[in-house]
Image (tube, rainbow, N blue to C red):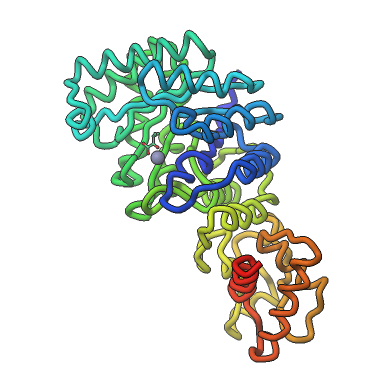
Amino acid sequence: MTDTSRVLIFDTTLRDGEQSPGATMTHAEKLEIAAMLDEMGVDIIEAGFPIASEGDFRAVSEIARAARNASICGLSRANPKDIDRCWEAVKHARRPRIHTFIGTSRFHRDMHSLDMDAMAERVHEAVTRARNLCEDVQWSSMDATRTEWDFLKRTVEIAIRAGATTINIPDTVGYTAPVESADLIRRLIAEVEDAETIVFSTHCHNDLGMATANSLAAVEGGARQIECTINGLGERAGNTALEEVVMAMKVRGDIMPFATGIDTTKIMNISRRVSAVSGFPVQFNKAIVGKNAFAHESGIHQDGMLKNRETFEVMRPEDVGLAATSLVMGKHSGRAALRSKLKELGFEMADNQLNDVFVRFKELADRKKEVYDEDLVALVRQNEGES
Ligand code: KIV
Ligand code: ZN
């Protein structure tokens, strides 16, 4: 029997996250991040968009070969060339998945110059083709939250009849609100024919800052897959942040009794690594993974924390892989402390590089009382630029 309290985590850092302008990762970095996602218990890794470039194709193929636990998914538009190329890349995985999509709202129908009937035909053809290649097929009605209800229901039913195993309901432009998000999934489950045979998935963008709330509301409404990225990396204001939805369900299991397979102690490490390889800093006050998420400065807070940490913390730093104490770097710090701090920030370096950064660090520490994490990142970047 399916465990109805289990929520699948579908990570799209390497696809939707990488689509973020300026977040391009190298081949080796993608493989490294995929291995970390696999290791931390992500259920499905969307490894890329195989038709987009030779590089994407190669990355998805290699990730598919290397993955030990997760399903490996590739994205494809709803056309034969994309779908076939996607299959060629993901077929090496133990558990391959093809994810095919088309925008179904009137904006997208206009963009493609397709009327509803023509678009419905595309859905049927795409899912049928994908299903003939792969047993695990995900269909996305892109811009679902701005698609007319009758047409959304129609596309979803066509996809299910054609063999889709997961139906994704994207809030592509971050427009929906939590109450609508829950209602939409609930209504789909109640009214779509054969809804019980597939998994409903939620995919939210953060344009209005509601991606996490909308994803959790969708789960409340019956979705059992959340699509998300590390640090919320993604186009415009980003996607739902993996660390936020996972920790919200863990900490508030009393009102959200859902389980994931994520080893949450690996969150901090992967957050730092994704930030380092994408070049996207994590904002200081970002929930769960921000530099200040477990920092206390004011006297009252410190006093409260010393007496009982629950006074000002709803979760333990160890649960997200953060050491309870943080290293404060100053002129008395040595090379070993610097190495450990840089590792914590996502930089593993050879001895000669470390020596160079250490010299720069000592010069700075003589001028500044405390050397902050961002100073160290700047020193590393400066060093990289000059070496
Ligand atoms: O935001 C979106 O609609 C997407 C789809 C391709 C799922 O990323
Ligand atoms: Zn998206």
Which image quarter: residue 178? top left
Which quadrant holds the N terminus? top right
Question: In the picture provided, is 203 more to the left or to the right than 371?
Answer: left
Residue 186 visible within the image: yes
Q: Which x, y percent locates residue 283?
A: 50, 65
Q: Which x, y percent locates residue 378?
A: 59, 72
Which image quarter: residue 187? top left
**Vertically, is 379 above or below 187?**
below
**Vertically, is 226 above or below 165?**
below
Q: Residue at x 81, y 65 (%)?
A: 351
Q: Which x, y percent locates residue 83?
A: 44, 19
Which quadrant holds the C terminus? bottom right
**Vertically, is 360 above or below 347?**
below
Task: Assign ligand 1 to one image quadrant.
Answer: top left
Residue at the extreme front: 387
Which image quarter: residue 120? top left
**Vertically, is 336 above or below 318?**
below
